[in-house]
């Protein structure tokens, strides 16, 4: 186990109380808190290095550009990207997927084509493909899940028989915690002639990721879910694919030469980074990666699996609680319902004890329909959580049970 109590002291926000209780922050799948090292990197950037990047001839602007490009290399090393120029900074996973749909998708998907997604995809890995398919007259094929919340591999195989243009899936489900066999899925999809996009929003913070070993084509990630700043993230892609893609946004920085009626475009990755980028986001994300690697991704994964296992074990002992998702080969996300208590009520009652969890559809409405629920309550763990947090969760839940007459008060 990690020394979570020690790690917690690195996070100023976690020193504060919520509703007069020690904060028990269990909404890490939505966003994580930020360590002092990241806050310092942001302040330091503005104190010593801030200028607009890629256009200054003076030393300060050169240093800002170097900091930004060093952050790109840091992200590239972290996920073993094909090359630093295959890392395009975005606002997060959502923008990265929209970039692929809007550029690769619009250039390559035609009427009658199929795009494969899964029933456990976050809306941000579904709606961009719906928009694309509606525009092109193409079809979405959604792969079903099994009873225990895994991808149905035989249905995946059937979907591939349509020879889809593109296959998109999450490495880790934000609502079920399922870890998908991403390398195997990518291999099968490639064999069927498809290009593969992996939604890495929930995997990058929690597992050691190697995009070359996964052998996907596109990989999307969010910095704010891995201790980095809000509005930071990246699309990691095979450079040859990016090179052949048309631009996504037009504007400054993405051009080479501009004429009255047309333009030529900059080299990678700048072709996809129109306008002034989020330099502080990139610098803060690089600091977050340093912090995470200081702990070690394998240890982080092990820690979360242990906490999720303890949570599932304790929750399952409470009569009336249903825990969703697989029991093993899963990440630190635990979705549950408690009888007919509305998940929003559960979250509100838990908040009285300082326990922050998410309630709702988790941007996975097609999945919620398959689970036959409108919403679930969801606890998600990270490096600063420990077994006391699991106990705080179940103790507060018992109070909710008492309030709604499920257990004697
Ligand atoms: N994909 C998955 C699997 C996610 O969990 C999320 C965010 C996204 C994409 C979108 O990421 P963004 O950084 O661009 O917003 N998931 C959640 C969540 O589970 N609760 O709040 C946001």
Image (cartoon, rainbow, N blue to C red):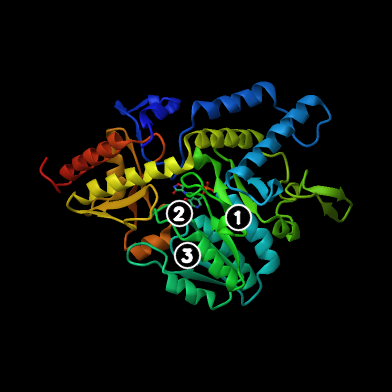
Report the disc number at residue 212: 1
Residue 318 higher or lower than 371, as above or below: above
**Looking at the image, is mark 2 or mark 1 earlier in the sequence?**
2
- Closest to the camera, between mark 3 and mark 1, is 1
Which residue is nearer to you in this view: 165 or 254? 165
Question: How far apart are the two marked residues, 3 and 2, measured between alpha carbons?
Answer: 12 Å
- Tell me the residue at 68%/59% (across/down): 103
Residue 206 higher or lower than 113, as above or below: above
Q: Residue furthest left?
A: 408
- Direction from residue 399 to residue 74 in the image, left or right: right
Q: Position of residue 207 (x, y in %)?
A: 47, 47
Dots 2 and 1: beta carbons under 8 Å? Answer: no
* Residue highlighted by disc 3: 118
Residue 176 higher or lower than 21, as above or below: below
* Residue highlighted by disc 2: 172
Q: Position of residue 357 (x, y in %)?
A: 35, 42
Which residue is nearer to you in this view: 39 or 67? 67
Residue at mark 2: C-beta within 8 A of ligand 1:
yes
Q: Position of residue 225 (x, y in %)?
A: 49, 42
Q: Position of residue 312 (x, y in %)?
A: 28, 49
- Closest to the camera, between mark 2 and mark 1, is 1
């Amino acid at each position: 186990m990690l020394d979570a109590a020690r790690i917690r002291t690195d996070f100023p926000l976690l020193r504060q109380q919520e509703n007069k209780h020690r904060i028990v922050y269990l909404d890490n799948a939505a966003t994580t808190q930020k360590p002092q090292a990241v806050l310092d990197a942001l302040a330091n950037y503005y104190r010593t290095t801030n200028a607009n990047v890629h256009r200054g001839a003076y030393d300060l602007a050169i240093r800002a550009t170097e900091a930004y490009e060093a952050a790109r290399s840091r992200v590239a090393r972290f996920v073993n990207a094909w090359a630093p120029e295959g890392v395009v900074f975005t606002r997060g996973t959502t923008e990265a997927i929209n970039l692929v749909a809007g550029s690769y998708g619009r250039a390559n998907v035609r009427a009658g084509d199929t795009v494969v997604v899964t029933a456990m995809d976050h809306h941000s890995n579904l709606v961009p493909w719906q928009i694309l398919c509606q525009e092109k007259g193409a079809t979405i094929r959604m792969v079903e899940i099994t009873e225990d919340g895994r991808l149905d591999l035989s249905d995946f195989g059937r979907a591939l028989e349509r020879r889809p243009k593109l296959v998109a899936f999450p490495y880790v489900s934000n609502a079920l915690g399922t870890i998908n066999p991403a390398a195997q899925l990518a291999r099968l999809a490639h064999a069927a002639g498809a290009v593969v996009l992996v939604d890495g929003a929930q995997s990058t913070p929690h597992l050691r990721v190697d995009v070359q070993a996964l052998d996907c084509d596109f990989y999307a990630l969010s910095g704010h879910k891995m201790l980095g700043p809000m509005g930071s993230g990246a699309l990691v892609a095979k450079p040859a694919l990016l090179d052949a893609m048309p631009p996504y946004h037009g504007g400054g920085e993405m051009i080479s030469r501009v004429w009255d009626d047309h333009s030529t475009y900059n080299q990678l990755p700048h072709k996809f980074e129109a306008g002034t980028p989020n330099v502080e986001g990139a610098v803060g994300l690089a600091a977050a990666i340093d912090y995470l690697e200081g702990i070690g991704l394998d240890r982080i994964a092990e820690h979360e699996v242990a906490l999720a296992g303890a949570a599932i074990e304790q929750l399952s002992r409470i009569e009336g609680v249903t825990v969703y998702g697989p029991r093993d080969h899963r990440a630190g996300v635990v979705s549950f319902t408690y009888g007919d208590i509305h998940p929003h009520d559960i979250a509100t009652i838990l908040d009285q004890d300082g326990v922050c969890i998410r309630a709702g559809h988790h941007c996975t409405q097609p999945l919620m329909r398959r689970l036959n629920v409108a919403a679930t309550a969801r606890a998600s763990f990270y490096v600063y959580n420990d077994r006391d947090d699991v106990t705080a969760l179940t103790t507060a839940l018992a109070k909710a049970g008492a309030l709604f007459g499920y257990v004697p008060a």
